[in-house]
Image (spheres, rainbow, N blue to C red):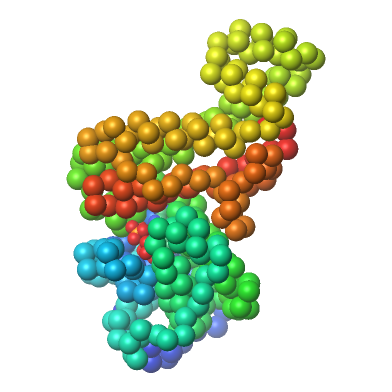
Amino acid sequence: MTDLLLIDTAEELHKLPRTADGPRAVVMTMGALHEGHATLIRTARERAGEAGQVVVTVFVNPLQFGANEDLDRYPRTLDADLELARAAGADAVFAPAVDEVYPGGDPQVRITAGPMGERLEGATRPGHFDGMLTVVAKLLHLTRPDLALFGQKDAQQLALIRRMVTDLNFPVEVVGVTTVREEDGLALSSRNRYLSAQERRTALALSRALFAGQDRLAAQAALRARAEASPASDERATALARLGEIRCAADAHAVSAAGTGLPDAVRAAARHVLEEAGRHDPPLVLDYLALVDPQDFTDVRPDFTGQAVLAVAAKVGTTRLIDNIPLEFGAHT
Ligand SMILES: Nc1ncnc2c1ncn2[C@@H]1O[C@H](COP(=O)(O)OP(=O)(O)OP(=O)(O)O)[C@@H](O)[C@H]1O
Ligand SMILES: CC(C)(CO)[C@@H](O)C(=O)[O-]
Ligand code: BAL
C-alpha cells in the first residue's frame, strides 16, 4: 500500500518531484469518491506503472455549477476520499480551496466549449461546460500530467476535454474509462447519495432504458441477418413471425421498408422504459434522451453507421442524474 501525500497549495504541487522512470497520471474529481473513481485511479496506476506517479485532484468547482444547482449541498467527504484514493493506488491528492484555484475571484478569461458545449447537458446547464473546461485546463497546467483519465459516464464532458486538448494543443494523453455500475445497472455517481430508497428504484429506469435500446439494436441486427439470408421479403416476414418475435418483426418490416430507421427503433425502446418510469412514485422527469454522434453530440441520422452514444438525463425528486451507453451501428444493422 502506498503512502499518500495531501497537497492543498499550487506551490507545493509545483514542488512535487516527478518520478524519473514513469509518467504522471492524473484523475480529476469533485470528491465524494466511489468505486467509479477507484476504477479510474486503479487504471491510472496500471498506466503509470509502479515507476510512475498517480495524482488525484479533489475540487468542487463553483464555475461549473448554475445558480439553482447543488453547489452548496454537493457532498464533501475528504477524509474518506483520501482513504479511497490511497487504497486505489494514488501517490498524492491535490485538494485546494476555492481561493487557491481562483485567487483573483472568478476568472475573467475562460475556455469556451463551442457548439458541442451547447447541446444536451449544455442546453440544460448553460455555462456548465465552459466552467468545467476552464478548471480542467487550470488543473492540467497545475498538475502537468502525461496522461489524464476521465469517465465515460460523463460522455459529453470527455468528448469536450478531448476536443480542447486537440484544438488547443495540450501536451497530454486523454484516457476514457468505461462506466462502472452497481449490480442492478445504476451508474455510480456521487449524486446517488441524494436518493432515498424509493427514488433509487425509479432512478434505475435510466440504465434500464439504455439497456432496452442496446437490446433492440442487438435484436434488430440478428433479425436483419436472418432476413437478409432469406430471398423475398414475404418469406422474410413469415420467417420472423414464426420465430414469435412479433414486435421485432414489426421493426424488421419498418426497417426493410424504409431501408433505414434503426436509430428511431433504438430511441423508441429506451423512451418506452422512461415513459413508464414517469408514472412511478416518485416519477422520473425526463430531461433528454438522445442518440448522438460522439464526435459532436449531434443526433445521428437514420442511416448512421459507426459508434453512437445513447444518452439520458432525468430528475428523480430533486436529484438530476445522467447516464449513457456506447452503441455500434454496423453497416448492415
Ligand atoms: N460510474 C462511473 N464510472 C466511471 N467513471 C466515473 C463514474 N462516475 C464518475 N466517473 C468519473 O469520475 C470523474 C470525476 O467525476 P465526479 O467527481 O463528478 O463524480 P460523479 O460521480 O460523476 O459525480 P456527480 O454525481 O457529480 O456527477 C469524471 O471523469 C467522471 O466521469
Ligand atoms: C472534470 C471535473 C473534475 C472538473 O471539475 C468534473 O467535471 C468531474 O468531476 O467530472
Ligand atoms: N460529473 C460531472 C460534473 C458535474 O456534474 O458538475
Position of residue 149 measured from the top left corner of the image (x, y, whole percent): 50, 65
Q: In which quarter of the image is the C terminus?
A: top right
- Most distant residue in the right direction: 231
- 66 lies above or below 262: below
Position of residue 44 measured from the top left corner of the image (x, y, whole percent): 48, 65
Residue beneath the point at 42% across and 73% down: 131
252 and 257: which is toward the camera: 257
282 and 51: which is toward the camera: 282
261 and 207: which is toward the camera: 261
- Horizontal side of 329 relative to 3 (left or right) equals right
Position of residue 114 measured from the top left corner of the image (x, y, whole percent): 55, 69
Residue 300 appears in the rendering: yes
- 99 lies above or below 322: below
106 and 332: which is toward the camera: 106
- Quadrant housing residue 240: top right
Q: Quadrant of the N terminus?
A: bottom left
- Quadrant housing residue 207: top left
Residue beneath the point at 31% across and 57% down: 190
- 7 lies above or below 72: below
- Horizontal side of 53 relative to 172 (left or right) equals left
Position of residue 241 measured from the top left corner of the image (x, y, whole percent): 60, 10
Residue beneath the point at 63% across and 78% down: 169
Residue 326 appears in the rendering: no
